[in-house]
Image (cartoon, rainbow, N blue to C red):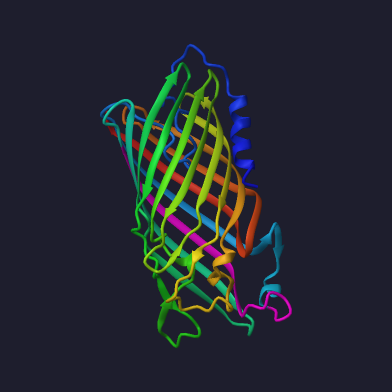
Amino acid sequence: MRHLIPAALAACCALAPAPAAAQWTSSRVDGHAPIGVMGDHRHERGEVMLSLRYMPMEMEGSRVGTRTIPDAEIISATGRNFMVTPTQMSMTMVMGGLMWAPSDRLTLMAMVPWLDNSMDHITRAGGAFTTTSSGLGDVAASALVGLGTWGNQSAHLNLGVSLPTGAITAMDVLPTSNGTEVQLPYPMQLGSGTYDLRPGVTWLGQARGWSWGVQGIGTVRLGENDRGWTQGNRLDATAWLGVPLMRDLSVSLRGAASSWGDVEGVDAAASVNPMVVPTARTDLRGGTRIDAGVGVNWYVHRPSGLRLAAELLRPLYQDLHGPQLETDYTLVVGLQVVPVH
């Protein structure tokens, strides 16, 4: 499936319109990507943009490879033989963003996430319980470096780094912990615990009645965290089309492909036995997913650059190293404003 990502990018590039006389601009209502895409555009020298995004994701049911399997099979002694399995997870991120352009070619960006996670479980004995974790996630900083603008097309490099500000020792009470908080498995942690490089490239284009963009971003983990494990490397690729319905309102269609690896190493101080629940297994964390999304972008107030936007993404394909919870949907609702021109 990894070959699908560069193939999708190549297909989108082949469909891109030829350069026109009009100059590419981010000031059009469709001059920003769907709100779920980060680092999609640069700003003019001296501009500042503030953003706020609310991003809930729902996951329910488990999958092994491309096959959905019942919870009973996971906890059955004659099935996957786990004592506990997650049945549902809600992940909510609130992300604040700041972009500032010291020059026309360079835009600097910082993203600060706050996470709230909740995971429901059932046990082989017929019990049920929920674990939660919340707090600051990994802060990211990026430089968007312009490669050039050619008529109605523009391209830039995305050069980012993620900082290990999110906790990797989040704790909660389990039914077997006698009222004492213990460390939760890997999916409930709030960060990677490592410095991560995030290199990528974004290519944008506009025609008279529509716009398009493609972006590829990698996440490369640098070494182990101080608990002795490393999240898997990740590759994200996306392509979108935007269509203005009127001067201040546009809609978008987007495809997104993601591939991520298993956890490497093991947390020697982990409190949960990997034989008990799939979330404690480092070899059941990787996978591939392809999503389709539809979005809307409303230019509320042009002088201030105030935009409201929303996007809903649903999976078309999931291939998971499981048992692993499958994604049902991701929603992104956001606000962007340019108070300084």
Along the line of sight, which residue is nearer the eye, 169 or 55?
169
**Lateral position of residue 210 relative to residue 96, left or right:** right
Question: Residue 61 location in percent, x, y?
Answer: 64, 64
> Looking at the picture, does residue 311 appear above or below residue 175?
above
* 95 inside magenta stretch: yes
Seen as rendered, the residue at the extreme top is 21
Q: Main secondary structure of the magenta part?
A: strand
Along the line of sight, which residue is nearer the eye, 80 or 340?
80
Magenta stretch? 76-99
> Looking at the picture, does residue 267 appear above or below residue 18?
below
Determine if residue 65 is in view.
yes
- The residue depicted at 53 percent of the width and 45 percent of the height is 236
Question: Residue 20 location in percent, x, y?
Answer: 51, 13
> Looking at the picture, does residue 77 appear above or below residue 92?
below
- The residue depicted at 35 percent of the width and 31 percent of the height is 305
Along the line of sight, which residue is nearer the eye, 267 or 97?
267
Seen as rendered, the residue at the extreme right is 78
Count of marks overlaid on the render: 0
* 116 inside magenta stretch: no
- The residue depicted at 58 percent of the width and 52 percent of the height is 329
**Lateral position of residue 68 relative to residue 260, left or right:** right
**Lateral position of residue 255 relative to residue 225, left or right:** right
Question: Residue 152 location in percent, x, y?
Answer: 48, 19
Question: Residue 263 location in percent, x, y?
Answer: 51, 62
Determine if residue 25 is in view.
no
Pick the quarter of the image with the C terminus: top left
- The residue depicted at 55 percent of the width and 60 percent of the height is 262
